[in-house]
Amino acid sequence: MSKTSNKPDISVADSYKKIVDRWEKLSAEAKLPSARSAITSLESQVEKLPAEVVDVRKRGYAFAKTLENDAKKLRSRWNLEERAAKKVIHDADPNLKKLVRDAERQLGVSEKRRDLHDDVDRKLDLLEDEIEDVEKRVDESLRDVRVEVNEIQHKLREATKLLDALNEASFKLFPNEHGVAVRPGENIGRHEGEGILFLTDQRILFERREKKATKKRLFFTVESELVAEVVWQAPIGSIVEMTAKDKGGFIGIGDKDLLMLTFADDAKDAPEKVTVRFRKYSDNEEWAETLLPYVKSGKIAGERIDVVKSAEFDTANLPTTCPTCKAALPKIYRGMHQVECEFCGTVVNIDV
């Protein structure tokens, strides 16, 4: 046979190997390992949720009181959702196997027939389309559960970040005070520096955190320690203005997600204004427009697992005069635990 006549044989061999490789790949995918793995993975996540909720409760997280019930309900209905997803696979299995066999039979008679390779490819196209369709239907059957799992997991991650930050904080929570949220950030202006913005149901505060070298070797730090210091704090009720501002850098580089707060003039020890640049998160608008007003209003108390008091700030029972000199006391804001008489210096405890 001449070299010219040998070229089509080489082309046939290469073409045949290509469609054999494709058939082997698709025949493996026809067993739907990705869809089965997705079901198993989601099942594992659902099963773990109740224990993960218990863990954050043991560590002191007091909000999102529906977490236990949400995780329990999701777990109790998982069997139905799992069966529905597996039924999609079960019902599709006969047709997938038939398509695999059809392609295999065509493949068996086309090794030396280049003119039949396109027929094999068309059958493999049908198989590939069916696999994608079944995987899509399995994914759609799991979508609602996945959304609920993601929502619960998000709340748990936020709670864990809060608890970890409180565990390392230089300050302690007051009795009956509970952490709500934290954000890494940079305090801009006075006491500038990197740190953590803490929000509780009674106050907001910024703790500057710096790593300082405790031991150096030549010019290199070999040992360091975390130095934490609260640089400002204020009762949550003393916030009078909350603004979010996004200062974009060049083509989006160096964006600054700013949260700017103004406090009441007569709020003792509170700064006049503060600006915090959020790090790693861009939800400064959500804090300014939703979270801070919600916490300031006291409505967040309704999310407490152990809430016994009304969310309303009961001003009727607040002290108004100094028990020592009878002078009028300064205004009291939600989140304050003590108030000091401006005339005689007597410190009056506030029952919260």
Image: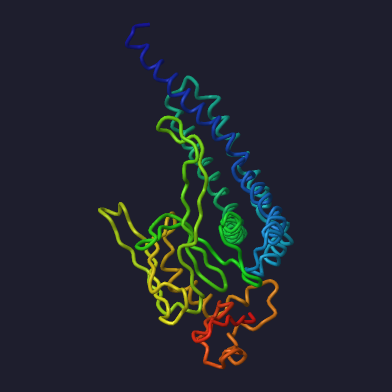
Q: Is residue 144 visible?
A: no
Please report the residue visible at 72 percent of the width from the left and 63 percent of the height from the top.
72
Q: Residue 166's spot in the image, x, y percent?
A: 59, 59
Q: Residue 210's spot in the image, x, y percent?
A: 46, 50
Image quadrant in which you'd find residue 301: bottom right
- Viewer-proximal residue among 343 and 100: 343
- Viewer-proximal residue among 133 and 122: 133
Q: How is the image coloured?
A: rainbow
Marker count (numbered): 0
- Viewer-proximal residue among 126 and 311: 311
Please report the residue visible at 67 percent of the width from the left and 47 percent of the height from the top.
40
In this rendering, the answer to whether 64 lies above or below 109 is: below
Please report the residue visible at 67 percent of the width from the left and 62 percent of the height from the top.
60
Q: Which quadrant holds the C terminus? A: bottom right
In this rendering, the answer to whether 180 lies above or below 340 is: above
Q: Residue 93's spot in the image, x, y percent?
A: 65, 44
- Viewer-proximal residue among 151 and 343: 343
In this picture, residue 69 sits left or right of residue 330: right
Q: Is residue 237 visible?
A: yes
Image quadrant in which you'd find residue 76: bottom right
Q: Looking at the image, which residue sits at the far left?
A: 250
Q: Residue 135's spot in the image, x, y percent?
A: 57, 48
Q: Which quadrant holds the N terminus? A: top left
In this rendering, the answer to whether 192 lies above or below 176 is: above
In this picture, residue 215 sits left or right of residue 60: left
